[in-house]
Image: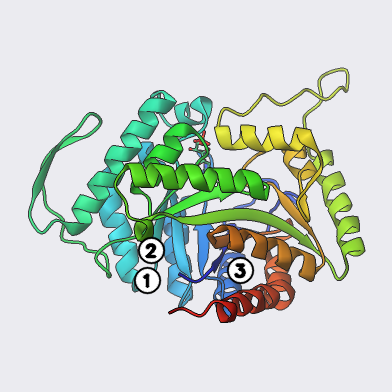
Amino acid sequence: MPVEFMSLTPPNASDEINPIPGAGVDPDYLVRYARTLDDYGFNYTLIPYGSSSFDPWTIGATIAAVTKNIKVIIALRPNTLYPTVAAKALATLDQLSRGRAVVHFIAGGSDAEQAKEGDFLTKEQRYGRLEEYIRILRRAWESADPFDWNGQYYQFKQFSNQVRPVNGTIPVSVGGSSDEAYRIGGSLADIYGLWGEPLEETKEQINRIYAEASKAGRAESDRPRIWVTFRPIVAETDELAWEKAHHTLDVLKSHGPSTNGAGKPTPAPAPQNVGSQRLLEIAARGEIQDRALWYPTVTATNARGASTALVGSPRTVADSLLDYADLGAELISIRGYDNLNDAIDYRRYVLPLVRAGLQERANRSPVA
Ligand SMILES: Cc1cc2nc3c(=O)[nH]c(=O)nc-3n(C[C@H](O)[C@H](O)[C@H](O)COP(=O)(O)O)c2cc1C
């Protein structure tokens, strides 16, 4: 399988460096961003989910309607939608987009965030529910006949699905770094999403995922494809990129932890999800890992989502990304701290170097 590239589509121009308080969906920005990714050969875009944020389904359908090739990844928390409804919604989007729908599952990494939308299951239960949910989706997409379901979390009778994915099924992605995430993702996912960790830790995670896949009886050719996520900060030279990185960090810090009455920063509570905990632990070991993986952006944001930067010239960043491809990552997500301009810069200066490096590797080891 070739290496593919990914971004995340924000609903408007608001970002961590230039937040626009209260910004609504900006249809012009959304369409421009999505078309830029599509024209520039990005293969996927993630539409994230947050309890107080915009609806990924309508955003995803809008993106599909104005693009030709890019695959639209809908982030989905099982507590927000009954699985038979999700199966049909995804298949409908898949038909509308001529086979470009993907689903990325979030079991839920924070009890407080889950409770905001009425979900009071424990984390272990949330992963149990996710397992059932994925099995129901696959059955709904594949089953020619009506079927009953009598599981721990869902029960229904004679569900009959008339809405089929274009290619028979839809890629299912799972993200997370807990034991439960490795087990469910390793055994059931087509794609496994990871945040940006150093090469050694990424390799460890890949090994865990593959071990769970083989425990579940999956052949090597059927293991989840690995997706890694970075926030590259790129400039013409390494030196200029580091200047830009420190400026980015200053701005992130200025929006950072709130202050108490005495003007002292109040420490943010430790995140509950293991993925963020791992990022913070690695950040505590040092600012730079490997060639150019930079962690102060993680600390400044309390590891809120994908927050690991890669800092350097296009050559440095491309070489870093190629290190992950060599490790076995097949999907590489790159989104900066200045979304639209960074997507354009990546396409102009970074992706050609990564693609050339991949081509070189393919030429070195011709397929028999
Ligand atoms: C690539 C990737 C994308 C993610 N996207 C989202 C998202 O859009 N919304 C969200 O709440 N969590 C998102 N997450 C977070 C995790 O899925 C979440 O923390 C997980 O349910 C529990 O994590 P844990 O198993 O590491 O404890 C994402 C994680 C990864 C790795």
Q: Earlier in the sequence, mark 3 or mark 2?
A: 3
Query: Percent from the top left, x then y, of residue 307?
Result: 68, 46
- The residue that mark 1 highlights is 97
Left or right, residue 215 beside residue 243: left
Q: Nearer the viewer, residue 353 or 365?
A: 365
Residue 101: numbered disc:
2
- The residue that mark 3 highlights is 33
Give the quarter of the figure containing the C terminus: bottom left
Q: Earlier in the sequence, mark 1 or mark 3?
A: 3
Left or right, residue 143 beside residue 322: left
> Which residue lies at the image location 51% right of the left edge and 50% below the top edge?
193
Does residue 188 lie above or below 358 as drawn? above
> Which residue lies at the image location 26% right of the left edge and 56% below the top edge?
88
Query: Percent from the top left, x then y, of residue 319?
Result: 72, 66
Mark 3 residue type = Tyr
Which quadrant holds residue 334? Answer: bottom right
Mark 2 residue type = Ala
Tell me which colouring the rendered structure shows.
rainbow
